[in-house]
Each structure stands twice: as structure tokens, then as C-alpha cells.
Amino acid sequence: NGQGQQGFISLDCGMPHNESSYTEESTGLNYSSDADFIRSGKSVEIKNEDPDFVMGYLKPYKHLRYFPEGTRNCYNLT
């Protein structure tokens, strides 16, 4: 594991706002949804019929936020 994350946030981009924050076991990092920091974009879950595909990825990579509209999409961290 790397250094602690004091003073940093780890966002799971695209994770639904109603899902609970979690700790990624392999890294020890605490992740939360990015929904409280941005109002634009669309959120999707990455799906594949092959169960080995999903199991081979860390949880933060199972969601995706993309921005089909607008010229600038920014996170508000204040």
C-alpha cells in the first residue's frame, strides 16, 4: 500500500450517489461517489457478460461518467 490519503479524496467517477462509500481492499483507499461534486455528465456501470472481465477490475473502474454535452465540465471541490 502507498501513503495514507489524509488531505486527499478519491472519487469513484460515475458511482451512483445512493451507493455507500467504500474502501478498496487492494489499495486501502477510501472512495466516494463523484455525484456531490458535479452536476453534469452521464453515469453508467460498465457491464460485460464474461464474469472474469468484471472480477479482474478494481471496484473504482466499474463505473464511468462521460460528458456528451457542453464545452466544459468541471468538478466543484469547495
Image (cartoon, rainbow, N blue to C red):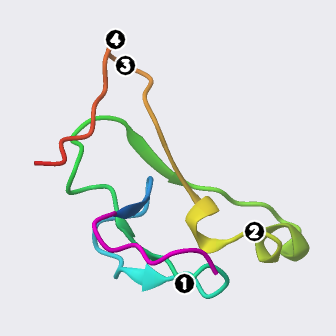
State how far apart marks 2 and 3 are (Cα).
28 Å
Residue 56 vertical placement versus 46 (above, below):
below
Observer-nearest of 26 and 20:
26
Give residue 69's mark. 3
Q: Residues within 10 Å of mark 1 (few under 14, many from 20)?
A: some
Relative placement, left or right, of 40 versus 62 is left
Q: Nearer the viewer, mark 3 or mark 1?
A: 1
Numbered disc total:
4
Q: Secondary structure beneath disc 1?
A: loop
Q: Which residue is mark 2?
A: 57
Which sits earlier in the primary sequence, circle 2 or circle 3? 2
Q: Nearer the viewer, mark 2 or mark 1?
A: 1
State how far apart marks 3 and 1 are (Cα).
34 Å
Q: Which residue is mark 1?
A: 28
Q: Residues within 10 Å of mark 3 (few under 14, many from 20)?
A: few
Q: Residue at x 24, y 43 (%)?
A: 38
Q: Position of residue 51 (x, y in %)?
A: 85, 76
Q: Residues within 10 Å of mark 4 (few under 14, many from 20)?
A: few
Q: Residue at x 34, y 82 (%)?
A: 20
Q: Which residues are magenta?
A: 1-8
Q: Position of residue 36 (x, y in %)?
A: 20, 57
* 54 in the magenta segment: no
Q: Nearer the viewer, mark 3 or mark 4?
A: 4
Taking the view exactly as shown, the residue that stands out farthest to the front is 3
Quadrant in the picture for residue 22 = bottom left
Taking the view exactly as shown, the residue that stands out farthest to the left is 78
Q: Position of residue 42 (x, y in %)?
A: 40, 40
Q: Which residue is mark 4?
A: 71
Can you say which quadrant of the picture contains the N terminus?
bottom right
